[in-house]
Image (cartoon, grey):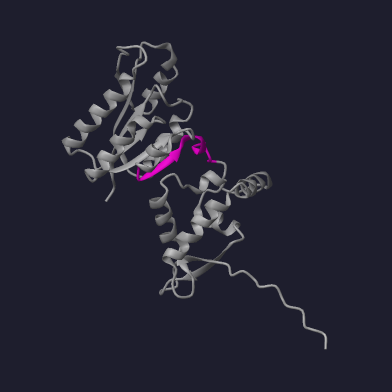
Amino acid sequence: MELNLAVLIDGDNIPSAYVKEMMEEIAKYGNPTIKRIYGDWTNPRLGKWKNLLLENAITPIQQYGYTQGKNATDSAMIIDAMDILYSGKVNGFCIVSSDSDFTRLATRLREAGMQVFGIGEKKTPNPFIVACDKFIYIEILKNQSDDDTLDAKSTATAKSSVDKMTAKEIRWISNTINDLADDDGWAFLGDVGSLLQKKQPNFDSRNYGFQKLTPLISSIPNFEVERREDSRGRKKLIYVKIKEKRQPKRRAKKS
């Protein structure tokens, strides 16, 4: 069943540069039936948003800053989110902000059975990230219509991204594979990806320069990937296991 999503955007906190890519990303997870953006539209700083709102059918919600230093936009978004929750018109929310003030809102919505997606910049505090079912960094939402095939430059970029993956992250993936592995050490990659997402909502292969999980895992020398046919021979199933460490050969003792 497709999710009906309420998309609530913190206009004071999110740059307008990637709004098209952001809306395309949201459409992957459900139907954005409610799209609202909050801010003080008398402020010239939000002027860049105005044409984009018309192009993407996003409704601007005016919220004056009543007191200097206080963010009235956050309060307006939270109140609207709860009104939408109780209306029963949606079964998921997308909160677009890098502000940790929405941590409790995301938690409350999930407690009510809603699926919650977060979108924000890489500076977003971890409490808000882990309060969501999935969190997407806005920096990776770039138009990739010309990326159907990787050229030499993009391949090199992807490799350098994997080289930056920390030992902690690789160990985290290894532990997830172990959690799901059969007696021979193999785990279905689809299940691995789902569990990685549950453990860390901001996990995304695009953070490391890859569009999909399979090429990311294949690029890491710690893992072995195997493609299998299903029982009907119609579909390729991807399995992964941790490579066994080769023991160094012992030199034979001279008699």
Residue 142 in magenta stretch: yes
- 134 is higher (above) or lower (below) than 183: above
Question: Which segment is the magenta one?
Answer: 132-145
Residue 87 sits in quarter: top left
- 255 is higher (above) or lower (below) than 80: below
Q: Which residue occupies the extreme left position in the image?
A: 87
Is residue 233 visible in the rendered structure shown here?
A: yes
Measured from the top left, where is residue 168 in percent x and y?
54, 52
Residue 83 sits in quarter: top left
Measured from the top left, where is residue 185 in percent x and y?
49, 71
Residue 11 in magenta stretch: no
Is residue 236 visible in the rendered structure shown here?
A: no
Measured from the top left, where is residue 127 in percent x and y?
38, 38
- Residue pictured at 40% horizontal, 35% vertical: 23
Picture mark count: 0
Measured from the top left, where is residue 212 in percent x and y?
50, 52
Residue 106 sits in quarter: top left
- 155 is higher (above) or lower (below) than 230: above
